[in-house]
Amino acid sequence: MGSGPAGGPTPRISSLLIKPASAVCNLDCAYCFYLDREADPYHALPARRMSLETLERLVDTYLFYSYPDSVFAFQGGEPTLAGLPFFTKLVELQKQYGRNGQTVSNSLQTNALLLDENWCDLFRAYDWLLGVSLDGPEEVNDLYRFNKQGRGTWKRVIQSVELLQKNKLEFNILCVLSQANVGRPQELYRFYRALRIGHLQFIPLAEFDQQGNPLPFTISPEQYGRFLCDLFDLWWPDRRKVRIRFFDNIAEALAGEKPGNCTMHETCDSYVVVEYNGDVYPCDFFVESSWKLGNMVVDSWPEIARRARRYSFASTKPLAHPECQACQYQSICHGGCPKFRHGPHGRFEDLDYFCQAYKMIFARSVEPLRAELRKLRVGEPAGLDRR
């Protein structure tokens, strides 16, 4: 496996977050963090779609490196703008370069505007996992999520949700929590339940101007904490039927497992971002020249994994504020996300902006979830399984 700078084993890159269309998108969402990324070296480039040559190099080298389990996740921008033929070629290459006994999984996060029966055929044939962005009822979703002409997207997304359901495809709903919906947990939960959605992920929005002031759509830690606590109470009677990722992650941490969400990991080194031209970065929130790890077209994956910058970035997680070291929940959140610690003040050693929210929901959820886990250990289904 090789060794790191301190002589320990090199942590493997366990999954790829691939940007086949980089920051290219067919929407113009008001809160998109790509819209004002001066540090993003790709935002102003005219052609930002991955070539088939780069795709082949990516599949060939990563399948060789990541045997026996290889995870490909696609985001954007909007990844479907790379085109259905791109993803059809992806699967062909995975078949060509995969080896006996190798497990390959694909996932895609999409705004769902371009989905049709042809996309569904691909997803069904190869068991893709999808994440569909939908922020709630029409007036909520369309406040910030609109197209280049300024028109709302809700109706088209609902059509795609119904299409996915008709085709019996697995998907999660990704809901960004903003000032449009953070005060409406009951309405949101009932809305998604009425749509027969069984897997939900809520993403807190926190963006700041250059002076460190929160932008108008940014939610406060107290708002986020109240939302999570109210949502937990709404979800608890349905906990064996509905999956909410944040609550699953808490349960995973309590069970001694590695949570699915990297925010709760001890270090920031589980995945890397691959840009359309092969450039590699340690995190989607830090696609900045100062954090570039290399380029997979010319560098090998073991070389990228051993780069000093990767270790430097991973070490930002333990730089948490001294208050974290004395916190009873430190073993669950490990100081939170460096993006939110870096946010308003620009220092990795700051408290996570949402620290207050985490303490609120941990105080509300930890003991009930521990009780459920005890039931699971003695053989009673507790409904906390992960897909």
Image (spheres, rainbow, N blue to C red):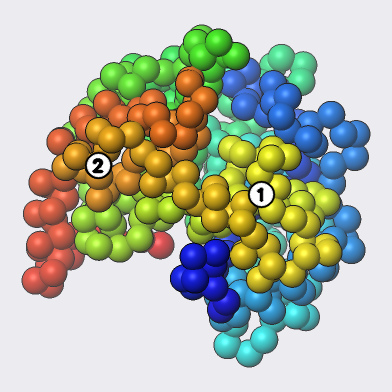
67 versus 88 height, above or below: below
- Tell me which residue sits at (33%, 34%) in the image: 321
Q: Residues within 10 Å of mark 1 (few under 14, many from 20)?
A: many
- Tell me which residue sits at (16%, 50%) in the image: 369
Horizontal placement of 336 versus 295: left or right? Answer: left
Give whichever of 163, 210 is nearer the camera: 210
Horizontal and vertical percent position of residue 55: 81, 62
- Tell me which residue sits at (74%, 55%) in the image: 294
Q: Amino acid at mark 1?
A: Tyr
Horizontal and vertical percent position of residue 191: 38, 30
Q: Amino acid at mark 2?
A: Gln
Horizontal placement of 44 versus 233: left or right? Answer: right
Looking at the rendering, which quadrant does residue 288 occupy? top right
Give whichever of 203, 360 is nearer the camera: 360
Horizontal placement of 15 versus 87: left or right? Answer: left
Element at label 2: helix
Element at label 1: strand
Residue at mark 2: 325
Horizontal placement of 54 versus 360: left or right? Answer: right
Q: Real-space Cα distance between discs 2 and 1?
A: 28 Å
Kindly tell me whether residue 87 is visible in this rendering: yes
Circles 2 and 1, Cβ within 8 Å, touching? The answer is no
Residue at mark 1: 281
Horizontal and vertical percent position of residue 30: 62, 18
Give whichever of 344, 188 is nearer the camera: 344
Give whichever of 195, 77 is nearer the camera: 77
